[in-house]
Image (spheres, grey):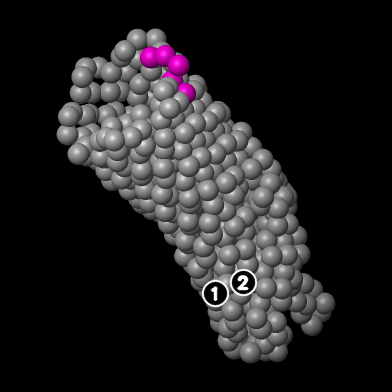
Amino acid sequence: MRRNWTTWVAGLAVLGLSSPAFPAGFHIREQGAKAMGMANAFVAQADDPSAIFYNPAGLAFQTGSQMSLGVTIIQVPETEFEGKTWLGEKNVSGSEFSGKQSARPDIFFPPNIYATTRLKSAPVAFGIGINSLYPLAKRWDTTSPFRDDVKEVAIKPINVNPTVAFQWKNLGIAFGVDYTYATLWLENAPYTTVFDGAGNPVNLNVGDLEVEGTGDGWGFNFGLLWKPSETWSFGVSYRSRIKIEVDDGDADLMVSQKAQDVLGLPSHVNTDGSTDITLPDTWSFAVAWRPTKKLTFEFDVDRFGWSSYDELALDFEDETVLHDETLPKDWENTWTFRFGAQYAVNDNLDLRAGYAYDNTPVPDDTLGPDLPDSDRHNVTLGLGWHNEHGALDLAYMAVLFKDRSVSNDHQDGEYKSEAHLFAANVSFWF
């Protein structure tokens, strides 16, 4: 598991500019509390303002004007690693790291805002959604054996999605545009291997690296919703790839005194960097069944085109110390299966539950501590209270990751993770 330090400075800079997020790789599917209460099996219902995200064709069947304000509270996965890392195998004291490490707890709050209106003079509806589809927050202790990979990483994206929907008899059709803007932050402590006077390998801390940058990109989406009867509805939605281009990334390396002495490096290295990444396209196929007026079941299948994340390439303006790099990622296309149910207790109160099985796109060879991902089970509960003026929706999700054994250049051991999400949306009808 030996590494060259310039490779990892470059690689980590790329990682910071385009690191994936929890859950489902890059993707945050939880964009509305009503849908989340049913494990996000909502594409064939799409009957509240969050339809803009799940299936914009649902707007065609909604009436009047609506606004929904919401937030998803994500407790970042409580990740524990047991095993060995490159940094710990041959450290300065000659001992070998083999034990447990835990990521520091963190919470972040991706918001969602939706506004819709349906024309009275024509079967046409308009809407706009503002949400966060690719957020990330992960922190390990500054002294952890992963400090050469990542001490802290944060990505704060915002997505703006205007859309228009049309109704023709029992069929809804919608089209929309996506604009994504993201800011990022990364800290790590890159290391390299040097040799002492006796020819023994020693791990040398090169310094402390901070990376920040911004990027943006455009995409499109569409949806279909067919309601052949009051009992059945069928939905399809698609969201295109988005190429995020980062042209103003900044890498700042404070070189350690020992690295200055041994490697002859300057005390401070600062340079601009650029990269791009293509976020995956997504397909969703869904069917909803209403055996009674009080009870609704829905089954969804999502397909994520993660093969778009095949490599990461970074170009540095100043290559005196940092050098251009291309790192393989080789992510795989995946499928997610969702089942949700809703029961109307009375005219004002709904109870919800759901289950989803989510496959990870990350292969063993490129798994790292920034996103120690694995297949997972998602279990959800929710409730909604509504009247003629609006609605309040609440939801909870437990994300139960499968234990992930891995052996690659990052680590040799096993990850265990779990996460908890809470969501709330307040909606108003006008």
Is there any visible trace of residue 370 in the rendered image?
A: no
Q: Relative to residue 392, is residue 290 depicted above or below?
A: above
Q: Which residues fall within the magenta stretch?
A: 226-230
Quadrant hosting residue 422: top left
Kindly state the secondary structure of the residue where label 2 is placed: strand
The residue under the point 48% across, 62% down is: 182
Amino acid type, mark 1: Asp
Read off the residue under disc 1: 248
Q: Is residue 7 left or right of residue 351?
A: right
Read off the residue under disc 2: 274
Relative image position of residue 146 (x, y in whole percent) = 59, 60
Please state, as top left, top right, bottom left or bottom right, where the C terminus lies in the image. Answer: top left
Q: Is residue 430 left or right of residue 236?
A: left
Nearest the viewer among 400 and 345 is 345
Residue 79 among magenta residues: no
Q: CA distance from mark 2 to mark 1?
A: 6 Å
Q: Relative to residue 379, is residue 21 depicted above or below?
A: below
Amino acid type, mark 2: Ser
Nearest the viewer among 214 and 366 is 214
